[in-house]
Image (cartoon, rainbow, N blue to C red):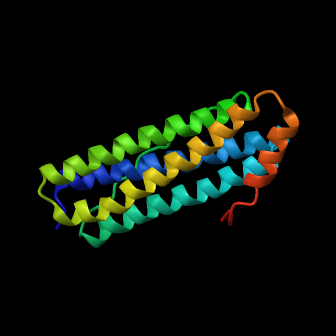
Amino acid sequence: MITPKMQDALCAHVEQEMYSAYLYLAMGAYCEAKAYKGFGRWLRVQHGEELEHARKVLDYVVARGGQTSLGAIPAPSREFGTITQVFEAVLNHERRVTERIHALYATAVAEKDTAAQVFLQWFIGEQVEEENAATEILDKLRMVGDRPGSALYLDKEYGKRGKTG
């Protein structure tokens, strides 16, 4: 059985994962409108991953006998600046997600919820991958700087990322 505190923390995290999905969907559309179809595709794949994360947490709460309670998802920005600024925002967002997951883990420890600790291990590892992927793209974009041809090459390469839905 899940404790009320753990249940509430996990339900709040579902909302955060849904916001992440919404944010990446908005960023993807923004990139596509700016002729960065590959980065748009990369972000749409990210959108799908965030939806899957939300479902995973929600399913866990239900499996533990918890009650789900979900609130409104705030609207993301409509403007994201340059392609480098888009991925700066991606990295900063993923760092905030990492902080939230660490806080969830701390709650699981405080609640003496070993099952939640084990469950959250997957998300901790996932965040290492998420931050690494965003850092790699951002480093490459900074490396190419103002060379549009190089940015378009990166756009093409990152557009090869898996399924979007």
* Any part of residue 1 in sight: yes
In depth, the one of 16 and 35 nearer the eye is 35
Q: Residue furthest right?
A: 149
Task: Judge left or right: residue 48 versus residue 128.
Answer: right
Q: Position of residue 47 (x, y in %)?
A: 60, 54
Quadrant containing the N terminus is: bottom left
Total numbered labels: 0
Quarter of the rendering containing residue 29: top right
- Residue at (84, 43) in percent of width and height: 152
In depth, the one of 116 and 18 nearer the eye is 116
Quadrant containing the C terminus is: bottom right
Q: Position of residue 98 (x, y in %)?
A: 39, 44
Q: Position of residue 57 (x, y in %)?
A: 38, 61
Quarter of the rendering containing residue 35: top right
Task: Judge left or right: residue 105 versus residue 122.
Answer: left
* Any part of residue 78 in sight: no
Q: Residue furthest bottom?
A: 63
In the rendered image of this protein, does residue 77 appear above or below residue 23? above
Q: Residue furthest front?
A: 143
- Residue at (84, 31) in percent of width and height: 147
Q: Position of residue 26 (x, y in %)?
A: 66, 42
- Residue at (63, 37) in percent of width and height: 139
